[in-house]
Image (tube, grey):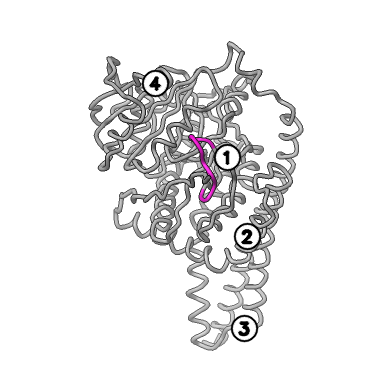
Amino acid sequence: MTGIGILDTGIIVFNYLILLFAATVMLSYVILAAISGFSLKTYLRQNRFVNYKALLALDSAPKVSLIAPAYNEAKTIVENVKSLLAINYNNYDVIVVNDGSKDNSIDVLTEAFSLVPSDKVYNPQIPTKEVKAIYRSSNKAFSRLIVVDKLNGGKADALNTGMNVSSNPYLVCIDVDCIMDKDVLLKLAKPYMEASGKRIIATGGVVRIANSCIIKSGKLVEVRAPGNLLARIQVIEYLRAFILGRMAWSKLDGLLIISGAFGMFDKEIALRCGGYDTKTVGEDMELIVRMRRFMIEHKEPYTVQYIPDPLCWTEAPESYSILRKQRSRWMRGTIETLYTHRKMLFNPKYNILGMLSYPYWLFFEYYAPIIELTGIVITLIMALLGVISWGYFFLFLFFVYFFAVMFSMIALYTEEATFKKYQSLADLRKLAFVALLEPIIFHPFTVLAAIRGNWEKLTGNKGWGEMTRKGFEKPTG
């Protein structure tokens, strides 16, 4: 075979491989979206008329501790803690863990909530960094609040500290910058109260973007599409991930992650598993995978449930530099979790986790950015050599773009057909417009951020990357 013949064959093989990969990704998205749509319809039919307030009077309502790690959150921490204290639930406390903040977070908390030293003794079941002090509020209005001041050890260490301090059997681990729906604990706790047979080890819910929303006294009073373009694009991204992705994986009983911003756990199982892993930056995903492995390996019937209601609102990055740090960290966390639990890959012992969930994450979450970048590089080389079929290239590009936009529009339509959080027609137009832009100006950036995450992992970068908070909108007038 001549050199030209080999090159032509290579081009044909390359085209077919890229086409096969793209078709597989798209088909998986369509299948997951169909499963999510069916599951959402079932969930809404079963829960539309539930009187959650009636659950408050039940003695069986689980006792819960909300654990909120805080690092340099002084600008937003008072509003955020008020949001946690305003939740509509009886049997719970709030544990804020100040993880060695360099700002005046502890002073702000002390002044706002009248904190005084507690006589509670710290007896760690999981080893953590040193706890300097434990505080309670002298104001009866904030009697649920516990504040722990400790040396910096990272988010996982802070969560383990909160787990040690907690005296309740269930934990809700959240980001302190989140704003919670008032019925959040009732909706998360309901599956535990209804459980029969299988033990529920974790429940998670939808996380939404709070940028430009109006927050008053720790409560979300008006939902708005973000004014910042980058944050607005992330609204579409979150809708796709939570409504059309995780809902389906929950239905398949193959969910590998509950967002670190928001999840409820069985404390006993979390402790038996050793708590959060302080050696990974993807502690949220890693703990869920480890808990699921633990239950399977000990042959204990269990399940993980997902609540599709938008229960948690968080501030998204509004600058590319901060977003890049976040996404590269997410990729490093994915790599660490997949490597730690590599035994599960195509292992029938782990049921759907080993045969479907793990391979999906490996090929479509970890390998996908690498494959995309490789495809771009090869395409550029082919263009320089003058052997590219431009007709095929642009047809393929248009098809991928059209699918990406269509999928985002389906996610937006699903949101409006179910929970209807965006009431303004102007907001819907803004979101629909960024759905057109996202594949062009956002997706390439996330691919490069993921590649950077791979590079950081290879070079031993273990940093978390600080995120500067802008703070939430205050009502005017």
The verdict on residue 13 being magenta is: no
Q: Choose mark 2 or mark 1, whichever is in front.
A: 1
Numbered disc 2: secondary structure: helix
Q: Choose mark 3 or mark 2, whichever is in front.
A: 2
Say above or below: 206 vs 443.
above
Q: Earlier in the sequence, mark 3 or mark 4?
A: 4
Label 2: few (<14), some or many (≥20) within 10 Å?
Answer: some
Residue that numbered label 2 is attached to: 430
Query: Closer to the camera, 452 or 129?
Result: 129
Circle 2: residue type: Lys
Numbered disc 1: secondary structure: strand
Most distant residue in the top direction? 59
Is residue 349 visible in the rendered structure shown here?
no
Disc 3 to disc 1, how far (Cα)? 54 Å
Question: x and y percent of residue 258 in the render?
Answer: 52, 38
Q: Quadrant of residue 157?
A: top left
Residue 389 is marked as 3
Residue 221 is marked as 1
Q: Residue at x 36, y 60 (%)?
A: 455
Disc 4 to disc 1, how far (Cα)? 31 Å
Query: Closer to the camera, 319 or 294?
Result: 319
Residue that numbered label 4 is attached to: 166
Q: Residue at x 64, y 21 (%)?
A: 53
Disc 2 to disc 1, how far (Cα)? 20 Å
Numbered disc 4: secondary structure: loop
Q: Choose mark 3 or mark 1, whichever is in front.
A: 1
Disc 2 to disc 4, how far (Cα)? 43 Å
Q: Earlier in the sequence, mark 2 or mark 4?
A: 4
